[in-house]
Image (cartoon, helix red, strand yellow):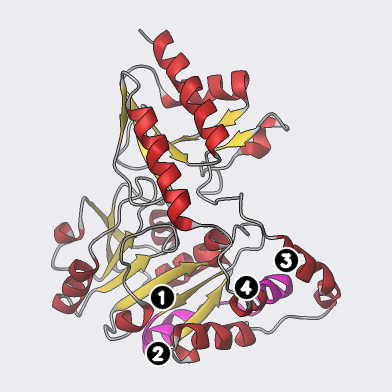
Amino acid sequence: MINGHGDDAYLYEGKIASNFSSNVYTRQDMSALDEHLASVVRSIHSYPEPDAGSLVRLLAEQHEIMPENICATNGATEAIYLVAQAFRGCRTAIVVPTFSEYEDACRVNGHALRFCGSLNDIGEDTRLAWLCNPNNPNGTVADRMLLIEMAARRPDTCFVFDQSYEYFTGKTMLGTKEALQLRNVVLLHSMTKRFAIPGLRLGYLTADGNMIRRIAAYRMPWSVNQLAVEAGKFLVGNSAETVNIAEYLAESRRLQFELSKIDGLTVFPSDTHFFLCRTARGKASELKRRLIETRGILIRNAANFRGLDEGCFRIAAQSVEENNTLVKAVEEWMRLQY
């Protein structure tokens, strides 16, 4: 899906003052990274490593695993397409509603697709299964032990668990080292999300060495550019967190609570900083348009997620002031619907 994702602020010519539509938290202080990239910008005049090997080795040290268990990618999205290509033409299950790129990548590669409400419904003949965890768009986290038990019980199915938002939840996630004990599990990781660098496109996947070789066989050389490699190495070597996750999640819960008090609005439970809402009257597209026009606020119309309807929209918490403004603006719009 080239269009139809969140953060389409570029369409509104500078009208957006508060962006709730992207799950990337941009309030992090990344000035140290900015300064580092400025100091190494001349490195763009040389080719990067074809496989981002120096970054892979640092990530391996950080996770206490072997470099052969990691493949660096141009964002988690490249990892998604590589997996789909490596399993071209197989029977595949996707737990929905979820990120559209799993479906798009699989369709491009001729998969026979089935859409399920949970992993328990994937079918005995499933060769590949996708689960976003924490899930986009509703922010739910699957129980770690259930994932382990499912993968152990289904050794002929490859399970792809997309953990792009793993650092934005208080729930216990499936660990990289324990996932390697299961040869049929692939974990997707996103430095783009963790460090708010979507313009650099940086992610990686971890898996059994044989699985990594199978997937990486389809990877083009130099897919991770030189500045992204430099950024990744800097961030791994200077791994202090740039956002207080506990405080941020607490503010997200407060925002969810305040919105849930609005008559006619349903706020769905979430385990992370973003969450799904549904309006009982009117369409999310109409609410989105009014918020842009009256407050310069951008939300994510979630109607194009498979399994959701025209009343659904997604919110990612921002600052306290911005969140309070959003609540008032949504409340005003909801009153106009009655």
At a point 44% along the width and 79% down the height, the residue shown is 215
User: In x, y percent, where is residue 230?
Assistant: 70, 76
Mark found first going from the N terminus, 1 or 3: 3
Label 1: how many residues lie within 10 Å, few (<14), some (14-19) or many (20+)? some
Residue nearest the observer in this picture, 101 or 107: 101
Residue 192, picture quadrant = bottom right
User: In x, y percent, where is residue 10?
Assistant: 67, 39
Q: Which residues are magenta?
A: 207-232
Q: How far, Cα to Cα, is label 2 from label 3?
A: 34 Å
Front disc: 1 or 3: 3
- Answer yes or no: is residue 12 visible: yes
Residue with the mark numbered 4: 235
User: In x, y percent, where is residue 293?
Assistant: 61, 20
At a point 32% along the width and 36% down the height, the residue shown is 308
Residue with the mark numbered 1: 86
Q: How far, Cα to Cα, is label 2 from label 4?
A: 25 Å
In the image, residue 11 sits, relative to residue 120, either above or below, namely above
Front disc: 2 or 4: 4
Residue with the mark numbered 2: 209
Residue 31, picture quadrant = bottom right
**Amino acid type for the residue under numbered disc 1:** Ala
